[in-house]
Image: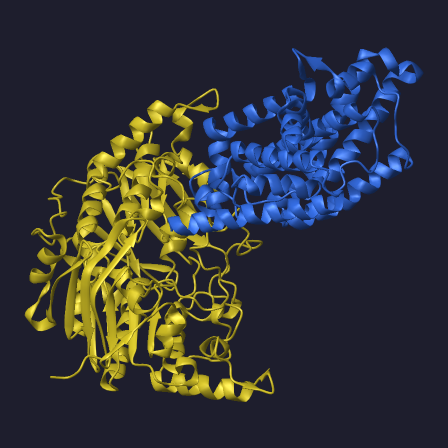
Chain colours: A yellow, B blue
Amino acid sequence: MPVPVLSAAGITVRYSGVPALQDAGIELYPGTIHALAGENGAGKSTLMRVLAGAREPDNGTITAGGQVLRLRNPRDAHRAGIRMIQQELSLVPGLTAAENIVLGAEPRRWGVIDRRMVRLRAAQAIASLGVPIDAEQPAGRLSLAHRQMTEIAKALDAGGAGTLRVLILDEPTAILPAHEADALHERLRALRANGLAILYCSHRLDEIERLADQVTVLRDGACVATGPVREMPASVLIPLMVGRAIERQSWRAASGTRPGPVVLAVDHLSTASRARGAVARAPGATPGATPGATPRATPRATVGARAGDPEMGFAASVADASFVLRAGEIVGLIGLVGAGRSEVALALIGAVQRSGGSVTLRDVPIRPRWPRDAIRRGIGYVPEDRAASALILHDPVRTNITLAALRSLVRWGVVERVRERLVTQRWTDALRIKTRSIETPVQHLSGGNQQKVVLARWLAAADPSLSVLIADEPTRGVDVGARSEIYGTLRDLADKGTAVLVITSDLAEAIALCDRLLVMREGWLVGELAGDDRTPERAASLMVPS
Amino acid sequence: MSAFAAAFFSLGNLVNVALSIAVIGILGVGMTAVILIGGIDLSAGSGVALAGVVAALAAHAVGGDAAGGSLAAAGAAVVAALAVGAIGGGITGLAVSRLRAPSFLVTLALLSIERGLAFLFSSGQAVSDLPAGFNWLGQGILLGVPVPVWLTAACFGGGWFVLSRTVWGRWIYALGGNESAAWLAGIDTRAVALGTYVANGVLVGLAAVVLTARLGAAVPNAGVGYELDVIAAVVVGGTSLTGGRGNVLGTLAGAVCIGILDNALNLANVDPYLQRVVAGVVILLAVLGERIRSRAHA
């Protein structure tokens, strides 16, 4: 029996009195990938934070090699050879990848940073990962995947000591397209072979099945099961996680109904000229000329020569997209990151100006200059990054839900508070948003419930009904239970006549949820799959450049 | 000490405290809104001086030599003050919302420009002989309470109502809380920012009216350093400098705290130089206390 490299027992953590973890424990072995499964709010993040020294437990002990460890801060954890990769990457964008890797433990000579040593250590860390990261690039210019790899390289460098024993990853693939996720998994397997203990938190059960050796399931702050992955397939894990058996595809409504009339017709849509010069249709169209706040979720194509390169994960522009959305239909927009999916959405709501093409809503040409124009015409938009672009995190559920609906809740400029509460209550009930009260700040809600708040905003704003709802990655970082409820909500909306456009990186989700799939590649809408053509193979062959 | 207590708690003294915070309080209402949208106004003190000087000059221009009794001259002075304030706010608002310039830098520039203009327009001299009707706004008593106290109360009441009950207020919180979310939710973030700065400017104008009327003269070096007292009141009142969180009731409490402190230290005959130190320490403690409290909640 091998000895665990790190073990925790009896861990209890309370946030302002509310227990987030109760008597939880886990044992991590060298050369093992240990998956952490559980719904949002089950305590996964808290357990990881405890192990990474980001939060001291109120009770419980952490031991490494028979010695009790006290992890008061991440520094303590680093010293013990434990590093965590946060879901939100935390590189300094202006520093190069190499500088980021040694950040906080810069090699010095006579008090001055030893640049040669920096390069050397960065090169070593990168080499041990085996990923071609350009160490001299500013981190902000790297693709998401490479930024993540840089973080892992930083962990491997371990402040120059190179004594990393435990690597903790919080939802590392949530931000990655499928092929990047595969690449990451390959790296993790290599690290495992080198004897590293890896704690891997994920919402994707298929991923756990493929990657992990061990799995621990958390529910309501307690560890409900732990064991080898091969003995715990998804059919075992899901009931453990949600505490009830749910059918994997319970949201799949029988969509035998014929699609309704065309609601939105998009003809040869394009956005600002592409750097490669492949498509430069609209003279005078400048990238980034968006007035007002530019949504942070949209990485700007600031690096001219690389804009639109799907491999690099930069926001592309749209070269040419034509499609229609019909009432009662859920249409999926799929493609690799950088294929221009999100840009289509941003152009449709006016957050990005289109440089060519036309859009008609119920046969009326529209050209929204900014989101407000689109909203007034009944187009709702659920952005990709709910924390950065949708929610006002420290404000209550109530004001977050009614933010786009205020016009209808106002008399003489004064918000009618009673009606506002009724509307909020109605939608929190309808979407089963789990919150202590409608006055709870949304930051205290789980990811799934936060996403429901964003959906509720558009349902509440729709007067009398939403013509089009565009949802960009609506189930990202959302647990299984809430996920199927969100699918149900989207289906209900479609059944009531809204044309729903879902952008998703989850192919299985796209195929199961959507009636039709639109496939984008490098800014071009290259194909459409309906009916039995909606297979992973067909989709993948269209998505990947040949 | 009992003599001190008697002096402090006398009705006259409490009215004194209220009067002493009138200008800071009025400025505080506008500053709260500006800070709520994530901005700052460093030009408040200079704005008070410029608006006061222009108001006094306007009174003389309309009333001529017989400015003393002219109600028209008084009206012109008030309108001029409010207009100057609104223009200052408009400039800041446009620079911030259209050009996305940092409010810190724009108002830092205005701080200098407005102060300079106040000296230029007044030739460096106090402008006195103001209309009686105008002076009443600073010195008059209505129902036993000084007029500036009424005006301050009205500003706080209005500010509270706008921020907590109206759509405009909701948009202010949304803009300060998450600008891209507000924009994507269809809020005209530029209009909200511009409107907030203009409203703040109008309040600067009103504060100038109260201060000038109380002194009976417009002085070009009036209001030096007021912006710092105002920001202190807002922050002590719990409004977050990062925007999105806070309210005017907190600012009122902050202004009252600072007013009481000044007043008490005065009554206790504390060295005026030491008073500044003590005031600073109290502000620091208030802010630290707030941080500790919010950390306990996290």
Pick the residue in front: A458 or B230: B230
Q: Is residue A375 above or below residue A151?
A: above
Residue A371: percent from the left, percent from the top? 45, 41
Q: Identify which residue is drawn at 36% across, 81% down.
A: A156
Q: Quadrant of residue B86?
A: top right
Q: Is residue B267 above or below residue A540?
A: above
Q: Observer-nearest residue: B30 or A9?
A: A9
Relative to A495, B152 lies left or right: right
Location of residue B46 (image quadrant):
top right
Q: Nearer the viewer, residue A196 or B237?
A: B237
x then y, percent, for residue B239: 52, 41
Residue B95 in view here: yes
Say which quarter of the image contains residue A507: bottom left
Quadrant in which the N terminus of chain B is drawn: top right
User: Residue A164 at what x, y percent from top left?
Assistant: 33, 81
For residue B8, above or below residue A490 = above
